[in-house]
Amino acid sequence: MGDKKDFIIIDDSKLDCFIAEKMIENTGKARNIRSFTEAREAFEYIRSTASEEPQEVKCVIIIDIQMPLMNGFEFLDEFEKLPSAAQENYIIFVLSSSANKKDFARISNYKSVAHLLNKPIKSQTLLDMLK
């Protein structure tokens, strides 16, 4: 099927990564799923593999906001420094377990973020976002 996508999950909780992987698998939309528990490691992977050529299949990044070392905001700051042609090959969903209005307002300042989702992620929510 041509509508399958690659996914990158970034969450400091191994359990949350596992749950997200299962939810993604259950949608039937996954071609490849790669998980990272450190945002810096995920960013380095993306930076080293990012292509400035338009990709037929966009990669979906699902990232938690609240993480130690490099949080979701810091990741987004770095991501948005990548060449815009490379950024266009990704769709970013940000996960938040907080109802912090400041976080929501801050997220809206990032042009690369497609959706803000509440934790825990649900298969139906993910399917709706992928349409």
Image: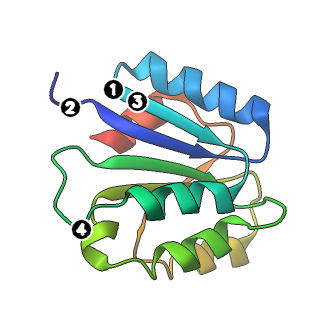
Q: Which residue lies under the disc numbered 4?
A: 52
> Given the image, on which type of amino acid does mark 1 rest?
Lys
> Given the image, on which type of amino acid does mark 3 rest?
Asn
Q: Dots 1 and 2: beta carbons under 8 Å?
A: yes
Q: Dots 4 and 2: beta carbons under 8 Å?
A: no
Disc assigned to residue 32? 3
Q: Earlier in the sequence, mark 1 or mark 2?
A: 2
Q: Nearer the viewer, residue 15 or 52?
A: 52
The answer to whether any part of residue 122 appears in the image is yes
Q: Which residue lies under the disc numbered 1?
A: 29
> Given the image, on which type of amino acid does mark 2 rest?
Asp
Q: Dots 4 and 3: beta carbons under 8 Å?
A: no
How would you rate the neighbour count of disc 4 (Cα within 10 Å): few for under 14, some for 14-19, many for 20 or more? Answer: some
> In the rendered image, which quarter is residue 85 located in?
bottom left
> In the rendered image, which quarter is residue 82 located in?
bottom left
Colour mode of the rendering: rainbow
Disc assigned to residue 3? 2
How would you rate the neighbour count of disc 1 (Cα within 10 Å): few for under 14, some for 14-19, many for 20 or more? Answer: some
Secondary element type, mark 1 = loop
* Residue at the spot 79% in from the left edge and 40% down from the top edge: 13
Classify 115 as above or below 106: above
Query: Looking at this rendering, what residue extends furthest in the right direction?
Result: 68
Q: Earlier in the sequence, mark 4 or mark 1?
A: 1
How would you rate the neighbour count of disc 3 (Cα within 10 Å): few for under 14, some for 14-19, many for 20 or more? Answer: few
The answer to whether any part of residue 114 appears in the image is no
Q: Position of residue 109 (x, y in %)?
A: 50, 82
